[in-house]
Amino acid sequence: MRRLLWVTSAGIVPSDLAATGFFFSHIFKPLFLNDVYADCALSERELGGSRLDWICVHPTRLTDGPRTATYRVDPWHTPPKGKEISRADVADFMLNQLSSDEYVRTTPVLAY
């Protein structure tokens, strides 16, 4: 199996920026993160053209909370009212994807 797990951000998809709130999408991102998001988008385009079994994980705002294993996953967009996810739950999701084909060649978004 040629599996690659990649992490970028839920804000990569322009339609998902609305879920991040006005301050982040209209002030913080344009002033400080445009180049970072452009690099993330480029990496995702490269993945899309590869023959790997890739999964590009899009976490929402990361927290230092505990692993709960009760997060929501949408294969393409931020789940409704999804604002954050703990790093531990992102790790939980990624470890589960090592033995699952459910999200291969998608960009699942994780949120509570």
Image (tube, rainbow, N blue to C red):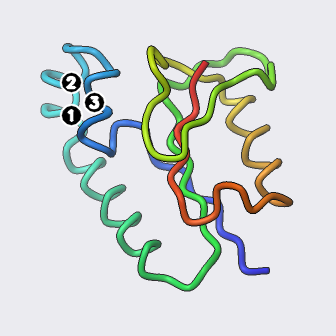
Mark-to-mark CA distance, 3 and 2: 12 Å
Q: Residues within 10 Å of mark 2 (few under 14, many from 20)?
A: few
Q: Quadrant of the C terminus?
A: top right
For the residues bearing labels 3 and 1, Cβ distance under 8 angstroms = no
Residue 107 drawn at (x, y percent): 50, 52
Please report the residue visible at 76 percent of the width from the left and 21 percent of the height from the top: 70
Q: Secondary structure at mark 2?
A: helix
Three-letter amino acid code at the position of disc 1? Phe
Three-letter amino acid code at the position of disc 2? Phe
Q: Secondary structure at mark 3?
A: helix
Horizontally, residue 30 falls left or right of residue 78, namely left
Please report the residue visible at 70 percent of the width from the left and 15 percent of the height from the top: 65
Mark-to-mark CA distance, 2 and 1: 6 Å
Horizontally, residue 85 falls left or right of residue 12, namely right
- In terms of image quadrants, where is residue 1? bottom right
Q: Which residue is mark 1?
A: 32
The label on residue 28 is 2
- In terms of image quadrants, where is residue 23? top left
For the residues bearing labels 2 and 1, Cβ distance under 8 angstroms = yes
Please report the residue visible at 73 percent of the width from the left and 30 percent of the height from the top: 89
Residue 97 drawn at (x, y percent): 76, 54
Q: Residues within 10 Å of mark 1 (few under 14, many from 20)?
A: few
Question: Which of pointers 3 and 2 indicates the residue nearer the eye?
Answer: 3
Looking at the picture, does residue 90 appear above or below residue 80?
Answer: below
Looking at the picture, does residue 38 appear above or below residue 13?
Answer: below
Q: Which residue is mark 3?
A: 17
Residue 53 drawn at (x, y percent): 64, 74
Three-letter amino acid code at the position of disc 3? Leu
Pick whichever of labels 3 and 2 is earlier in the sequence.
3
Residue 102 drawn at (x, y percent): 71, 56
